[in-house]
Image (cartoon, rainbow, N blue to C red):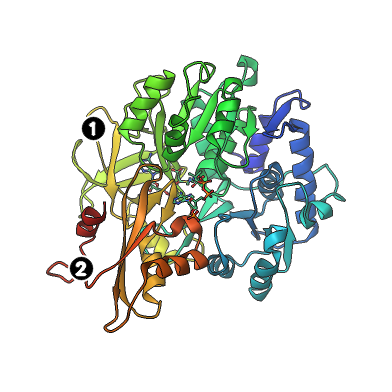
Amino acid sequence: MSEVSANLYAHLRRAFPGDLERCAIETDAGQCYSWRDLDRGTAMLANFLCSLELPVGSRIAVQVEKSVEALMLYLATLRAGYVFLPLNTAYQSAEIDYFIGNAEPAVVVCSDQNFGWVSTLAFKAGTRHVFTLNDDRTGSLLARAAHASDQHAVAIKKPNDVAVIIYTSGTTGRSKGAMLTHGNMLSNALVLKEYWGWRSPEQGGDVLIHALPIFHVHGLFVAIHGALINGSKMIWLGKFDPKVVLKHMPQATVFMGVPTLYVRLLAEPGLTREVAQRMRLFVSGSAPLLLDTFAAWQERTGHTILERYGMSETIMLTSNPYRGERRGGTVGFPLPGVTLRVVDGQGTELASGDIGDIQVKGPNVFAGYWRMPEKTAEEFTTDGFFKTGDVGRVDAEAYVTIVGRSKDLIISGGYNVYPAELESFINDLPGVAESAVVGVPHADFGEVGVAVVVPRPGAALDSAQILAVLKAGLANYKVPKQCHVVAQLPRNAMGKVQKNLLRAQYS
Ligand code: MLC
Ligand code: AMP
């Protein structure tokens, strides 16, 4: 990869179809953005960012509702050579305060509605510029960029230059910013383009229904890069609504979702073979897809969902084959270029079929955690493998199955929820002696949290009130669906809380 060509945006741009007037993105409201609109819009935003004369490597933190303009801001940040930092729209002030304090962004972009509290936090942390962007094409960012030129030379980047920081809690502790480089993202996008058989515009092209949020790997990278690096059109839905997805399905060929999206689509009588007739590929990931869902989908639509596995630190790692057998309950094979091994507690590689810790290596593996060299070192082995925190096995035919996680993590509707974060929040509440949060199966979200709380002697705790306090302070999807006040937590002989017993009790 030459220096000039390593900017991911340059590669995406090169894949735009020759006819720039064609529709690149169609919204549910029927608006069409052409490829030329994308090119010009990202140029204007990139020029505006450059006009701020930000230092090299500046972070652009963005917490906005999904819109085509928000997508353009992401592309413009790549184009201008800065570092994009997407933030879940559900995050509340304590969460945003931490991310801004940790990442020290030069620019923060939020909605007009949140400008008051977000700008207070940002200016306090030393951020010089706070702009707004709403999902109706308004906000100070677009107003300012409207004066910028629509011609922009893509910034030159090296493959190892950081392009995006995604916050994740990884295996332990507070959220860490996973630094992904232009090289990481480009290699993954190119591999998936081949692996999933994306059809070029000359072959009739693909049309992707984009119904995921754009602040995580699945919606931001896998879906967007997949479509753009192939010159494919996207049908852009601001929010997932199964009826709206079904309305667009006859015009589409590719859909990507977390398992909850498939569960909700299956609940719609409108999901039929006819509606899915033109579809070429259904991809699922971010959380385990139940075999029941896999089988029900096959039966209802005649299509076999392709399940793949990835994470923020690595983008995509494994995938079921596009042409070979897609095996339910497995996440398929390591992608070309990815080396995956399963090891025991001592780091010795296990034979096929044996269950152990999954470790990976490849051009897609991130550059480390932002300003946390020790944490980064802890998560890599001496021979350079990244410890995923997932537990699994590889069978004799090389299919990978994930059987659990060594990290204490709940995946709810495709979002990660860290029990340690919730427990520390609950333990700080008045009258609480200790707490444990465990994940239990849930028909819609796959898994949800349950909090088990022990009061201090003499204190009276009210579960509904605890949940209300959590709801007021944390992103809504993190809030446990139930809270139980108990006299004590079950512990083993070592004094460790036996979460397996709590899980069994509250399932
Ligand atoms: C919403 N709620 C959730 C939830 N999402 N609760 C638990 N888990 C979730 N994921 C709750 C809210 O707290 C709220 O509760 C109520 O549901 C309604 O909120 P909403 O925002 O209107 O929900 P809805 O639009 O229905 O959202 C559900 C969803 C969404 C499944 C569409 O969660 C979603 O888009 N998930 C996708 C996540 C994703 O993209 N993950 C990719 C990570 S990347 P109340 O009580 O306030 O009413 C990754 C790597 C990889 O993991 O491999 O891809
Ligand atoms: P995140 O940190 O948000 O990127 O979440 C990554 C985690 O999601 C992985 O480490 C896995 O635990 C989980 N994950 C992703 N895809 C799958 C899948 N197909 N099946 C099971 N777990 C998955």
Quarter residue 376 falls in: bottom left
Question: Which kind of residue does numbered mark 2 sit on?
Answer: Lys
Judged by depth in the image, the label closer to the viewer, 1 or 2, is 2
Beta carbon at label 2 within 8 Å of ligand 2: no
Secondary structure, mark 1, is: loop
Residue 42: x percent and y percent? 74, 43
The residue closer to the viewer here, 161 or 369, is 369
The residue at 51%/62% (across/down) is: 370
Question: Which kind of residue does numbered mark 1 sit on?
Answer: Asp
Quadrant location of the N terminus in the rendered image: top right
Q: Tell me: residue 406, above or below residue 37.
A: below
Quarter residue 425 falls in: bottom left
Asked whether, in this view, residue 492 is left or right of residue 271, the answer is left
Please indicate, yes or no, whether residue 381 appears anywhere in the rendered image. yes
Most extreme residue toward the bottom is 458
Quarter residue 130 falls in: bottom right
Asked whether, in this view, residue 224 is left or right of residue 423, the answer is right
Q: How many marks?
A: 2
The residue closer to the viewer here, 106 or 421, is 421
Asked whether, in this view, residue 102 is left or right of residue 64, the answer is left
Q: Earlier in the sequence, mark 1 or mark 2?
A: 1
The residue at 40%/77% (across/down) is: 428
Please indicate, yes or no, whether residue 173 appears anywhere in the rendered image. no
For disc 2, the neighbor class at 10 Å (few under 14, some 14 to 19, many from 20) is: few
The residue at 33%/40% (across/down) is: 340
Beta carbon at label 1 within 8 Å of ligand 2: no
Residue 496 marker:
2
The residue closer to the viewer here, 272 or 210, is 272
Q: What residue would you read off at disc 1?
A: 395
